[in-house]
Image (cartoon, rainbow, N blue to C red):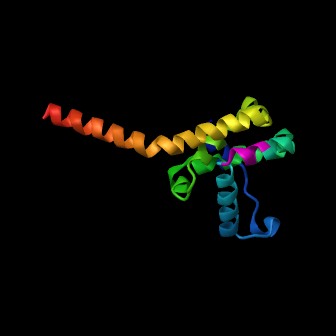
Amino acid sequence: MSAVEASDAIRRADEKHTGCSDRERYLLELEFVQCLANPHYLNWLAQHQYFDETAFINYLAYLQYWQRPEHACHISYPHCLFFLEMLQSKQFRTAMARADVTEMVHSQQFFFWQHYRQNRFKASVKDSLADMEQS
């Protein structure tokens, strides 16, 4: 059973127990998941021992449902899905408590953003040239 399927099996508390509607809960979870795209926020969570709490780790597992296309289409910061997946690993959660690791992750994320468009353009041109040569 995958983490996404396991999260589906977890019973969701109803409005009576949570104090908010399903829509409000969905939006709150969306906002929280998107915060996970920030390596400095992950460092803050690690520094404040959130990653040591079983309930919080279970919540991160539950949030894996955001990986599914019907939910992922609402995500504005797709790196959050990568980090949500990485946070399933205790080794990653432990590493994010270190400032040097956080800075390295942040730098790699920046370089990805900096070069993503240019690299996609180069790949597109390369693919177009290859298609033209085959024709």
Q: Quadrant of the C terminus?
A: top left
Q: Residue at x 83, y 46 (%)?
A: 55
The percent position of residue 110, horizontal first and vertical second, equals: 58, 43
The percent position of residue 121, horizontal first and vertical second, equals: 35, 43
Q: Main secondary structure of the magenta part?
A: helix
Q: Quadrant of the N terminus?
A: top right
Q: Can residue 102 be seen in this snapshot?
A: yes
The percent position of residue 104, horizontal first and vertical second, equals: 67, 34
**Position of residue 55 in the picture relative to residue 60 (left or right):** right
Residue 13, located in which quarter of the rendered image?
A: bottom right
User: Camera-side residue: 86 or 5?
Assistant: 86
User: Camera-side residue: 70 or 14?
Assistant: 70
Q: Residue at x 73, y 57 (%)?
A: 12
Q: Can residue 9 be seen in this snapshot?
A: no
Q: Which contiguous range is marked in magenta? A: 38-43
Q: Residue at x 46, y 43 (%)?
A: 116
Q: Residue furthest left?
A: 135
Tally of numbered discs: 0
Residue 39 part of the magenta segment: yes
The percent position of residue 49, horizontal first and vertical second, equals: 87, 42
Residue 129 part of the magenta segment: no
User: Camera-side residue: 5 or 53?
Assistant: 53
Q: Residue furthest top?
A: 91
Q: Is residue 103 above or below residue 66?
A: above
